[in-house]
Image (cartoon, helix red, strand yellow):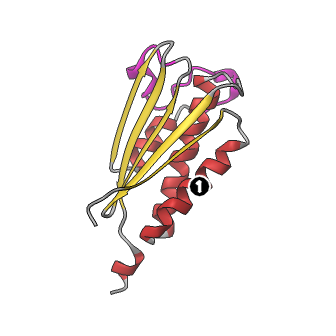
């Protein structure tokens, strides 16, 4: 099968939708029969990216929209999480572990670090006033392959 299987999900930038996004992506990826660790990694990075979009991109404005594009080709999952929010002024600074632009919210500043470490590929692009896109890839080692 050379064709990619794709899905797109767009939802309001509300914190209660973060769990929905995690579950939707996990359900989509489940066709690859991922290990629990792989599934948890994917759910974690979706949580981090969506939470960043809601809190930092839109300042918790529920009128904002977050879009997740996911595709599966072979054993590789590609994810693109994007918002049209505030964007990031200094991307290099934002990617530093423990940096947060909202210390008053007791944020850990580990979102980008977690995403980068849990995935095989990670890219973030952002433009102030336009929004942020996070592209990630992960190769899934199917449980079926582990037991054969």
- Within 10 Å of the Cα at label 1, are there few (<14), some (14-19), or many (20+) other Cα atoms? some
Q: Quadrant of the N terminus?
A: bottom left
How many marks on residues? 1
Q: Residue 50, located in which quarter of the rendered image?
A: top right
Q: Is residue 129 visible?
A: yes
Q: Is residue 56 above or below residue 73?
A: above
Main secondary structure of the magenta stretch: loop
Q: Is residue 108 visible?
A: no
The spot of residue 54 in percent (x, y) is 63, 30
Q: Residue at x 63, y 21 (%)?
A: 102
The spot of residue 136 in percent (x, y) is 38, 44
Q: Residue furthest left?
A: 2
What element does badge 1 sit on? helix
Q: Is residue 110 above or below residue 86?
A: below
99 left or right of 146 in image: right
Q: Residue 64, located in which quarter of the rendered image?
A: top right
Region rendered in magenta: 87-107
Q: Residue at x 54, y 31 (%)?
A: 109
Q: Residue at x 45, y 43 (%)?
A: 115
111 left or right of 139 in image: right
The spot of residue 67 in percent (x, y) is 54, 37
Q: Quadrant of the C terminus?
A: bottom left
Q: Residue 57, located in which quarter of the rendered image?
A: top right
Q: Is residue 112 above or below residue 20?
A: above
Q: Is residue 40 magenta?
A: no
Q: Is residue 91 magenta?
A: yes
Q: Residue furthest bottom?
A: 148
Q: Residue at x 26, y 62 (%)?
A: 2
- For disc 1, the marked residue is 24
The spot of residue 90 in percent (x, y) is 42, 15
């Amino acid at each position: 099968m050379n064709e990619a299987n794709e899905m797109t999900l767009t939802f309001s930038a509300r914190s209660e939708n973060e769990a929905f996004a995690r579950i939707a992506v996990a359900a989509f990826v489940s066709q690859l029969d991922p290990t629990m660790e792989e599934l948890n990694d994917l759910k974690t990075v979706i949580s981090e990216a969506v939470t960043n979009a809601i809190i930092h991109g839109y300042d918790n404005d529920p009128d904002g929209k977050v879009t997740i594009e996911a595709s599966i080709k072979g054993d590789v999952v590609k994810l693109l999480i994007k918002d049209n929010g505030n964007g990031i002024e200094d991307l290099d600074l934002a990617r530093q572990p423990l940096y947060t632009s909202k210390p008053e919210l007791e944020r850990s500043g580990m979102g980008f670090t977690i995403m980068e470490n849990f995935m095989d590929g990670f890219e973030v692009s952002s433009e102030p006033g336009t929004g942020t896109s996070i592209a990630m890839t992960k190769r899934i080692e199917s449980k079926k392959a582990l037991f054969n």
